[in-house]
Structure formats: structure tokens, C-alpha cells
């Protein structure tokens, strides 16, 4: 079981460090086949087959996305693959992270894992089916700069103060972005501390940017900072420092 979960996190880390072009399009060297099959097993990146249905990737554009959300998506997505002077395509500085409503649902594994699969659990930010109603977001990672950006459109079900986004929903997105970033940087982690300063309210329905940056690593501890701003950067909504502690995944699930 722990080994299966390890594969999930390894797949996640590889998404942060390997080119999707390399993983999916290059000649099938032994390494790329191994990487690809790990990703397929652990992250549900399966190709259509009679035996598996393809999971929904929630981070792709849908009709609820505002023009600003789409514009920013295109801005980062266009930097995931760039063209050389010779006209060849190669990986760019950014990579889009796919997003599913269950981290473990598409992993294979032993008896203990199948019990988890049978449960009704869903990722908190991806459990509302109506598009645009709650958390619409997409993450891009820049391994070179050790940065992660998230374009987030807050739907009408996230209301806190009238007409504005609930502070807990904002914290959820900060935890999601910094937690994902820390996992890419350090493997399996748990949030130990989130320290959020709320500077200005976020209007409901608006699109904002979350920028997560590695501050430093000290042993098992990964320190990350995160800023939420308006999309033009002129308004700061929140400033956060976050601490993630590396864990043994088997220890977490067995409660030992
Ligand atoms: C299934 C895996 C879960 C992780 C998932 C994360 C990301 C997944 C990635 C992608 C998936 C997609 C989306 C993800 C979405 C959201 C991510 C959400 C992540 C969470 O939402 S997760 C839930 C909330 N989270 C908790 O439920 C944690 C409860 N907690 C504990 O489980 C323990 O508390 C733990 C493990 C944190 C540490 O326990 P431990 O026994 O392993 O280590 P220990 O206590 O010895 O601390 C070691 C060193 O950290 C320092 N330290 C510890 N805590 C500190 C604090 N608060 N402030 C300052 N320093 C602290 C110590 O001072 C020491 O420092 P030093 O070594 O220098 O002495």
C-alpha cells in the first residue's frame, strides 16, 4: 500500500520536473516508458482504452471561465511548449498540472488501497459538479524558478462577506497551491503552518492570481511564501508564509 502511494507522489513530483513532451511524445526509451507507465498508473493519465474511462481533468478551460481566466490560461499554456529557431517544438519554462477530484482514485494498489477507492471521498476543491459555481482554477509550475502560479476564479458558492470570497475558501486555495508546490519540491508533505494576512477582499466572481515561491528547505521542512493578487498585480489580496513537513506516507495512512 505504502509503495502504491509512493508511486502517486513520485508521479506528482515527476510532473513537476519532467517535460510532458518527453513523457508522451519522444521515442520510447526504457526510461520514458517507465516514467510514462508510472504516470499512467499513479496520476490517471491513461489513454482511452476499453477497460478504463478517462478521468475528467478539472484544470482545462470550460464555458464558465471568464475572458480574463482564459487569457491568463493562454498566457501560461503558450509557455509550456516553445518553438526553437529551427522550428522545432520543445518544452517551455512552464508546465500545466492536471487536476482530478481524487488523488488516489486512479492509482492501482493492494487491499488497503482498494478500501480507500471504494469510499466516497473527493478532493474538497473539486467536489462541486456545476462548472463555475465554486473553485475554478488551474496551476502551472516553473521548475527552474521553483515557482507555481494558480489562476483562480471564485464562484458564487464561495461567498463570505456579502459579494466577496470567504476567508476559508481563500485559505483553501492557498493551502492547495502551496501544498501542491511543496509536494512537487519535496515529495509527500503535510501542512504544518499557514500564516495568512488578508489585505483586501476578493470580489465574488473575479479572477485572481496565486503565486507560490520556495523560500527555503531545512531538513524535513519546506518553507513557502504565497501572494494572492489581482491579475494585473496592482492589488494585493493576501500574503502567506507556509510550512510543510515531509512525512512517511505509510505512517500517515496506517495511523502508526
Ligand atoms: C496524503 C498526503 C497529504 C499531503 C497532501 C499534500 C499535497 C498533495 C499534493 C497534491 C494533491 C492535490 C491537492 C492538494 C490539496 C491540498 C493540500 C492540503 C494539504 C493539507 O491540508 S494537509 C492537512 C492539514 N495538516 C495536518 O493535518 C497536519 C497535522 N499535523 C501533523 O500531522 C504533524 O504535526 C506534522 C506531520 C505536521 C509534523 O509532525 P511530525 O511528528 O512528523 O514532525 P515534528 O512534530 O517532529 O516536526 C518536525 C519539524 O517541524 C517543526 N514543526 C512542526 N509543526 C510545526 C508548526 N506548526 N509550526 C512550526 N514548526 C513546526 C518541528 O518543530 C520540527 O522542527 P525541527 O526538526 O527543527 O525541530
Image: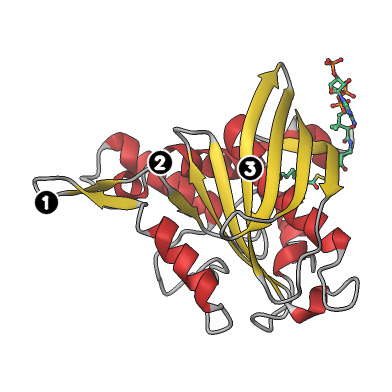
Q: Is residue 249 visible?
A: yes
How far across and how far down the image is residue 207, in percent?
63, 68
Quadrant (top left, top right, bottom left, bottom right) of the C terminus: top right
* Element at label 1: loop
What residue did someone put label 2 on?
A: 35
How far across and how far down the image is residue 105, in percent?
65, 60
Estimate the spatial distance between the alpha carbons at disc 1 and disc 2, rounded to whole Å.
27 Å
Residue 119 lies in what quarter of the image? bottom right
Image quadrant of ligand 1 equals top right
Estimate the spatial distance between the alpha carbons at disc 3 and disc 1, rounded to whole Å.
32 Å
Quadrant (top left, top right, bottom left, bottom right) of the N terminus: top right
Q: Specify the label residue 87 is tagged with.
A: 1
Q: Nearer the viewer, mark 1 or mark 2?
A: 1
Q: Is residue 135 above or below residue 232?
A: below
The local crowd at label 3, few if under 14, some if 14 to 19, many if 20 or more residues have their Cα within 10 Å, is: many
Q: How many marks?
A: 3
Q: Residue at x 66, y 42 (%)?
A: 5
The local crowd at label 1, few if under 14, some if 14 to 19, many if 20 or more residues have their Cα within 10 Å, is: few
Q: Is residue 4 visible?
A: no
Q: Is residue 115 above or below residue 85?
A: below
How far across and how far down the image is residue 225, in percent?
70, 36
Circles 2 and 3 in contact, beta carbons < 8 Å: no
Q: Is mark 3 within 8 Å of ligand 1?
A: no
What residue did someone put label 3 on?
A: 212
Q: Residue at x 50, y 77 (%)?
A: 67
Q: Is mark 1 within 8 Å of ligand 1?
A: no
Q: Is residue 94 above or below residue 46?
A: above
How far across and how far down the image is residue 112, in percent?
76, 49
Q: Specify the label residue 149 is tagged with.
A: none
Amino acid at each position: 500500500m505504502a509503495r502504491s502511494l509512493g508511486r502517486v507522489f513520485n508521479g506528482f513530483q515527476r510532473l513537476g520536473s519532467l517535460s510532458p513532451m518527453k513523457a508522451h511524445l519522444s521515442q520510447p526509451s526504457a526510461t520514458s516508458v517507465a516514467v510514462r507507465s508510472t504516470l499512467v498508473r499513479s496520476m490517471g493519465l491513461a489513454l482511452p482504452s476499453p477497460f478504463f474511462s478517462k478521468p475528467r481533468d478539472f484544470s482545462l478551460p470550460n464555458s464558465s471561465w471568464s475572458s480574463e481566466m482564459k487569457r491568463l490560461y493562454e498566457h501560461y499554456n503558450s509557455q509550456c511548449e516553445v518553438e526553437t529557431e529551427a522550428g522545432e517544438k520543445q518544452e517551455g519554462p512552464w508546465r500545466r498540472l492536471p487536476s482530478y477530484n481524487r488523488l488516489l482514485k486512479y492509482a492501482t494498489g493492494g487491499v488497503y488501497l482498494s478500501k480507500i477507492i471504494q469510499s466516497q471521498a473527493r478532493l474538497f476543491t473539486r467536489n462541486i459538479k456545476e462548472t463555475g459555481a465554486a473553485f475554478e482554477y488551474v496551476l502551472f509550475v516553473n521548475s527552474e524558478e521553483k515557482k507555481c502560479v494558480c489562476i483562480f476564479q471564485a464562484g458564487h458558492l464561495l461567498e463570505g462577506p456579502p459579494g466577496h470570497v470567504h476567508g476559508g475558501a481563500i485559505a483553501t486555495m492557498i493551502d492547495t497551491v502551496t501544498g501542491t508546490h511543496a509536494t512537487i519540491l519535496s515529495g509527500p508533505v503535510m501542512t504544518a503552518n499557514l500564516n495568512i494576512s488578508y489585505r483586501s477582499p476578493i470580489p465574488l466572481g473575479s479572477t485572481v492570481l496565486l503565486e507560490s515561491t520556495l523560500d527555503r528547505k531545512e531538513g524535513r521542512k519546506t518553507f513557502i511564501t504565497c501572494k494572492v493578487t489581482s491579475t494585473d498585480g496592482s492589488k494585493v489580496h493576501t500574503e502567506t508564509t507556509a510550512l510543510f513537513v515531509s512525512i512517511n506516507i505509510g505512517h500517515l495512512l496506517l495511523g502508526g
